[in-house]
Image: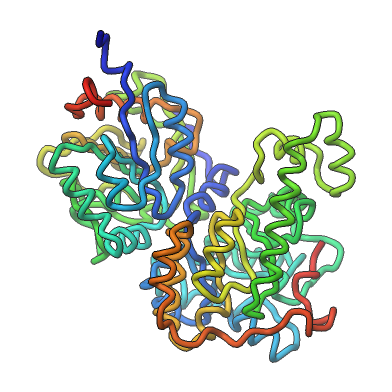
Amino acid sequence: MTEEQKSTWRTKVGLAEMLKGGVIMDVTDAEQAKIAEDAGAVAVMALERVPADIRREGGVARMADPLKILEIMSAVSIPVMAKVRIGHFVEAQVLEALGVDYIDESEVLTPADEEHHIDKHKFNVPFVCGCRDLGEALRRIGEGAAMIRTKGEAGTGNIVEAVRHMRTVMSEIRKIQSMREDELMAEAKRLGAPYELVVEVHRTGKLPVPNFSAGGIATPADAALMMQLGAEAVFVGSGIFKSENPAKRAKAIVDAVTHYDKPEIIAELSKGLGRAMDGIDVRQLEERELLSVRGW
Amino acid sequence: MLMSNSLHNVVIGVLGLQGDFEKHVEMLRRIDGVAPLIARTPEEVRVCDGLIIPGGESTTVGKLMVRYGVDEAIKSRVREGMPIFGTCTGMILLAREIEGSEQYRLGLMDITVRRNAFGRQIDSFETDLQIPAICDSRPLRAVFIRAPIVSEVRGSAEVLSRLADGRIVMVRQGPHLAAAFHPELTDDTRIHEYFVNVVRRFTPTALNTK
């Protein structure tokens, strides 16, 4: 009678549903994880280096040391996510063995496979993947991603790419919604996306899984901007712990995501946060320095 | 002429500070005579006849409630008789005791809860649940995500459902209802309908002003 099933599609997407309206913060140790939790983060991303440091130091960026991840998992009661390199399914197997709550197959780390992403259906742990447009989002969902985040350009403190990617996804969704049914196959071909998922977007007017925003959020207003553009939650990477007052900024960004449509509240909580992280003009970056172009 | 309560809308708020509140709103839209409202401010809470506290992160929702005075608005409406239905995080926030935690809670039900009682996300599951008081003999598909359980029930709080192993996953006390799982993640509206009926019973104004 009681047919119990673990790790179903519903439990995977369900956790993403629970994170909506929240802020997921990059942390590199237990102390930062506690600061994030105390500020009201809905989850933390356990990392060895935040994207701004990965960008500065260069070299190959890999999955974090399991000791580091376990230290962070034992420090907080909220969900803990961790990143693997694109296509590195053994790093993903390791994270599943550690018991992390969500795996981010992330362009912030150096890709392990330039052709294939991980077959995420094979795993019990749910995955989040980045995208720059709707086709990329639907390809990742086709592979089993239970949450999508637009990529932005991580580690820059510059919101411009996050805005570009979210606007692209949302306008492509609106376009599909307004199409005739007999136009959907050609659109699936154009997007390079699974036909069934294009049909679902046409029917529902939204992505089949929650749609979050990442890459470049540095202020409460940045976070609220992404929410007003259609993000259902935000990831903040370097923006918190590379700023002058991480605890205060983290709390302000949490509040701004909840009250993203109330400018008077955002005005109040944006006061006196100290210096934001130093930003990078994305137009000054060389093509090879861009992270968002990793993966397809 | 007034025929019955069901002809009149009740305002069911869904606390929209953080979590899967949209899923609850979708459920409520499928029930006749309900005006769903996403409530984020004390003013919005004050116009609700009943309130659902959705799934989310309990530490996050607790903090956001206190920062903007939403907790006091909820407590004051509860003193006037407003029923609350909490799912998962909502159940944690309704409990008087949370094992091993000092985090904020409304403390409106005489229960003790244990957070993440089944383990981490990899232990999240769904199962068929018997809830005799609400669902007759047809089981409800219940989705448990990093779910809590009720480890102790006191006073007038009563158990509505247990897992096969005996662990308590749904309770009621007076007008309040709490579930460790997420009925809003399925297509089954029976629990929401039940709560709407509770709200109709506890809402003195439903007949004449709504």
Dividing the picture into quadrants, the one containing residue A131 is: bottom right
Q: Residue furthest bottom?
A: A57
- Quadrant including the C terminus of chain B: top left
Dividing the picture into quadrants, the one containing residue B86 is: top left
Residue A251 in sight: no
In the rendered view, tell whether residue B95 sits above or below residue A52. above
**x, y (%) of residue A1?**
45, 27
Residue A278 in sight: yes
**x, y (%) of residue B185?**
49, 38
Most foreground residue, A244 or A188: A244
**x, y (%) of residue A285?**
79, 83
Residue sitting at 42 percent across and 36 percent down?
Answer: B183
Horizontal relation, residue A158 to residue B34: left or right: right
Residue sitting at 68 percent across and 58 percent down?
Answer: A166
Horizontal relation, residue B142 to residue A183: left or right: left
Coloring scheme used: rainbow
- Quadrant including the N terminus of chain B: top left
Most foreground residue, A34 or B150: A34
**x, y (%) of residue A7?**
56, 47
Q: How many marks?
A: 0
Residue sitting at 39 percent across and 54 percent down?
Answer: B17
Q: Residue furthest left?
A: B155
Horizontal relation, residue A14 to residue A131: left or right: left
In the rendered view, tell whether residue B156 sits above or below residue B194. below
